Image: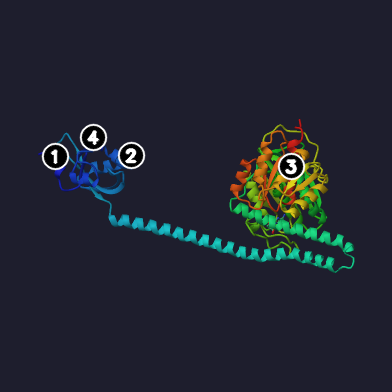
Amino acid sequence: MDLLDFIDTFPESLLAVDLDGRILRVSSVCAAMLDIKAGGLAGYSLAELSVDTAQHLDACLKLWAGGASYTPARLRLRKGTGELVDFVCEGARYRPDRAHSVLLLKLRLKDATENMFKELTRQVASLEQEVVRRLRAEQKLLEADRRKDEFLAMLAHELRNPLAPIMNSLHLLRLSSDPSRALNNCRAIMERQVRQLARLVDDLLEVSRWTRGAAELQRQIVSLSGIVQDAVATSKPLIDAAGHDFELKIPPRELFVYGDSARLVQMLSNLLNNAAKYTPSGGKIVLSLDVEDGQVVAKIIDNGIGIAPSMLEQVFDLFVRTDNSPDQVSGGLGIGLTLVRQIVQAHGGRVTAASEGENRGSQFIVHLPLHQQVSLAISSVDPSRPSPSLMGLRILIVDDNRDAANSMAAMLGMLGNDVQAVYGGHEAITVMTAFEPEVVFLDIAMPGMSGYEVCRRIRSNTAACRPMIVALTGFGQQGDRLSSREKGFDEYLVKPVSMETLQSVLAAKRRNSLPAAG
Ligand code: ADP
């Protein structure tokens, strides 16, 4: 009997290969070990069975061919199940006759304890990584929790601050023997403080919308000069009040971005407000626009209190304020820059802060993707020019809350618009034809006829005008926003609506209704 025939039934895990590694015979024990049918490997080569490199296999074959005693080497083989297993393979040259040489290989699983040890080491390492990851996460949570506590304390403080002068003014009006004399003064105080309160509440609502993922961009192609103009108009009172010198550097051609104009105005004016707040009186603030590598680059530069290098990244985190913020700077909750970053990132851009250190001024640099459009020559934007967006529009306000409707009507009327306020859906439909408004601010939740129904009727009356219809609601749910658009609304605003938001909605309306520049 030939030795090779003998291998088939030999009670050890044996593999016979020729000097090139072609498989000649496999013992049934070896076939079982590899999960392969006996005889199933005939015609294959070691290289097909192994996942080791050709060099390694070559070296093994040479090693085994070189000696008569069994020399061990490591092989990684693919079992019939596809599993990769490490084997120790002892091989030696055997010459059944002078003409032929056979390499006889004996396979055994690589030391099981070694494998186990390796697996254990791997598990310990991944456990260590997991512990470190969890410790870091815990530290972050503790830090966020600490910041939240600080924030709540600060919020209470910031909300109480404006309340005191409002209460005092009210007392004064009640006690004064001639209230009309005190009126102007008190009104100015109350106006300032209510604006401050509204800004705080707006910021809080907005940041909660972003963190809940409920914020949604109303994007269209918008001109940056309009955005800059609205942002400057919003922040100019604060800049002027601090006696800062303000400079606007914009290129002589019109730049466009695909974005949400209200959000972009809010973002820029937050940065301008910060520059005004964190610069001692009589400072210098510059807003510049440029184009670099197909991106619009807006820089807001001040020569104020500056930012320590370690804080440059952190200032964008929620509720973060730097230690060098002067105490007298109030109205800051550490959410403005978080909003700035959220808005910029939602537009596919990025924002960074730079400063040479404390008291060396700060720069906030915003990159936004430029929307390629025919460039238009523009003169320059005059920051002192009143925004045209708030003038000369026919506006209908529909709200069952009469105080809300009347105050909004009075405000928009004073700014030069022709405004009418009605307090229910049926009334709104009745005045539509005669008044032909260009913009309708429409409350959604009204008794009798909902804002949705009013909107449907306005849109289905093809003979009547096609005004811009803006939904006003108390909720900022994503679903409401989507369904309001499907139901024919052009814009969706969550109450309370800030002056800035109103301004940018009307600005968009004006821009859309102006004849195209060419
Ligand atoms: P806040 O409402 O406190 O102004 P922000 O998120 O807008 O919140 O800013 C976070 C912090 O970053 C501020 O409290 C201030 O410490 C710092 N900061 C922002 N802008 C400037 C700036 N232009 N110069 C110096 N520090 C700034």
- Camera-near label (3 vs 2) is 3
Query: Dividing the image into 4 quarters, which one contains the C terminus?
Result: top right
Q: Which residue is mark 4?
A: 43
Q: 37 or 512, which is in the foreground? A: 512
Q: Which one is earlier in the sequence, the residue at label 4 or at label 3?
A: 4
User: Mark 1, residues whose alpha carbon is within 10 Å: few (<14), some, or many (≥20)?
Assistant: few
Q: Tell which quarter ligand 1 is in.
A: bottom right
- Camera-near label (3 vs 1) is 3
Residue 447 image offset from top left, x and y in percent: 67, 51
Contact between marks 1 and 4 (CB within 8 A): the answer is no
Query: What's the amino acid at mark 3?
Result: Thr
Q: Which residue is mark 2?
A: 54
Rendered position, 30 above or below 378 = below
Q: What separation in Å lies between label 3 and label 1 (alpha carbons)?
A: 104 Å
Contact between marks 4 and 3 (CB within 8 A): the answer is no
Query: What's the amino acid at mark 4?
Result: Gly
Q: Which residue is mark 3?
A: 430
